[in-house]
Image (tube, rainbow, N blue to C red):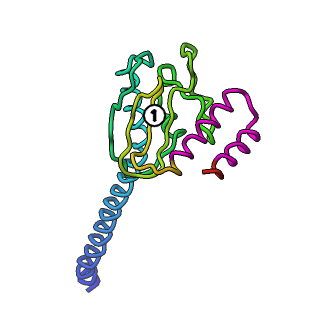
Amino acid sequence: MFKKGIIEAIPGYFYILIALLIGIIMTMFLLQFLGEKNFIISQIPKNIAKLAHDCWKLNRYGINPESSVCFVVNISNVTNEKEITRFLKCEELPNNLCYPDNCSFCTSKTAIDNDSLEAFIENSGYIKIAYIDKKIVISSLECDNYCECKRNCIREANRNLREGKTINEVDSKYNNCVSIC
């Protein structure tokens, strides 16, 4: 009788084991999907940096006298200049100024101007990567007057930083500039 009870209990254990295996497999699929989505989002700054570098190369590393739009791409998430700068080849395309963040880590010993990139990505959607005035400019295509004014304030803040003004002075001038917009 004792052996008969064990034999009758075995199918119940199999059902429990099968249910656990199905649960583990479903969890693995769910984690893989979530990880893949975050991976794609985290690749946006890296891909933009690659396109910016390609544009820089197309324009002969900043010596081309004419402006051009190199790429128009659609992005699903907003990123900022510092995130893009993290993926730049700084010896070829340096970017040491990205107000209000700190990009002083991205310099080049051979570059004449270590601020060779500007990024103004205010929203997701279409952005353009262009070569303008010996710089790579990355910007959202949809930009109203306020947006354009704010971009000019950031440019002015970067100019002030280049001139050696303190961060408090730059912050004050930037806030005044944006309040006028």
Q: Is residue 16 magenta?
A: no
Considering the numbered disc 1 on the image, is that residue within a helix, a strand or a loop?
strand
143 shown above or below 111: below
Q: Quadrant of residue 34?
A: bottom left
Task: Please provide percent x and percent y for residue 35.
Answer: 39, 53
Q: Quadrant of residue 139?
A: top left
From the viewer's perspective, is 22 left or right of 42?
left
Task: Please provide percent x and percent y for residue 84.
Answer: 48, 37
The residue under label 1 is which amino acid type?
Answer: Val
Task: Please provide percent x and percent y for residue 102.
Answer: 63, 36
Can you identify the residue that label 1 sits on?
137
Q: Which residues are magenta?
A: 148-177
Q: Quadrant of residue 159?
A: top right
- Report the residue at 39% width, 26% height from top: 67
The residue lying furthest to the top in this view is: 110
Task: Please provide percent x and percent y for residue 135.
Answer: 48, 26
Local crowd size for mark 1, using a 10 Å CA cut-off: few (<14), some (14–19), many (≥20)? some
Q: Nearer the viewer, residue 44 or 67?
A: 67
- Report the residue at 30% width, 75% height from top: 16
- Report the residue at 51% width, 20% height from top: 91
